[in-house]
Image (spheres, rainbow, N blue to C red):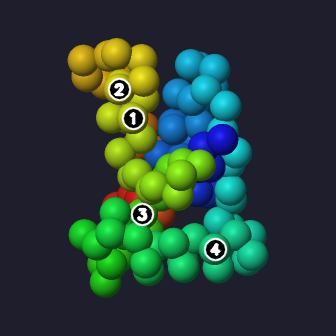
Amino acid sequence: MIKIFGMEQCPHCRRCKGEFDGRAIAYEFVDISRLENLKTFVKLRDTQPTFEGIRGTESIGIPALVFEDGSVRRDWQAYLNEVSGDADDTDVPEESEGAACALDGSGC
């Protein structure tokens, strides 16, 4: 089963969960606001190449998908497009309210 690392307060994570729910794709949501989950996520973020572009920045890197084979993706919209055969995600409205996951308040 896919694990989605994120936070309930994160608008991008809520949007991701909503899209997975809407497409009836099973997942486990791992809320990193819980300390034990945060430790797991930080280790993942510090070791996975997927996060290279955001290490040392104010971005957190959520939502992040972790697959059963251990692979990690941050591009959840592209993943959903691949599994559903959609050409793009232009029909998915951007949610900006509360985009404060990064330290500078710009989003995740």
The numbered mark at residue 35 is none
| Residue 78 in view here | yes
Residue at point 58%, 56% (across, down)? 5
Q: Give whichever of discs 4 and 1 has the lower sequence position.
A: 4
For badge 2, the amino acid type reads Glu
What residue sits right under mark 2 in the picture? 82
What residue sits right under mark 1 in the picture? 79
Total labels: the figure holds: 4
Mark 1 vs mark 3, foreground winner is 1
User: Separation of disc 4 and disc 1 at Cα?
Assistant: 22 Å
Q: In terms of depth relative to the viewer, which is nearer, 93 or 18?
A: 18
Q: Give whichever of discs 3 and 4 has the lower sequence position.
A: 4
Where residue 70 sits: x, y (%)?
Answer: 52, 58
For badge 1, the amino acid type reads Tyr
Q: Quadrant of the C terminus?
A: bottom left
Q: Determine crowd level at label 1: few under 14, some 14-19, many 20+ residues with C-alpha closer than 10 A.
A: some
Above or below 108: residue 53: below
Q: Determine crowd level at label 2: few under 14, some 14-19, many 20+ residues with C-alpha closer than 10 A.
A: few
Callout 4 secondary element: helix
Callout 1 secondary element: helix
Where residue 27 sits: x, y (%)?
Answer: 66, 39
What residue sits right under mark 4 in the picture? 40
The numbered mark at residue 61 is 3
**The image quarter in which residue 107 lies:** bottom left
User: Separation of disc 3 and disc 2 at Cα?
Assistant: 21 Å
Q: Give whichever of discs 4 and 2 has the lower sequence position.
A: 4
Q: In terms of depth relative to the viewer, which is nearer, 23 or 8?
A: 23
User: Separation of disc 3 and disc 4 at Cα?
Assistant: 13 Å
User: Separation of disc 2 and disc 1 at Cα?
Assistant: 5 Å
For badge 3, the amino acid type reads Gly
Q: In terms of depth relative to the viewer, which is nearer, 15 or 23?
A: 23
Decide if residue 39 is on the left or right side of residue 13.
right
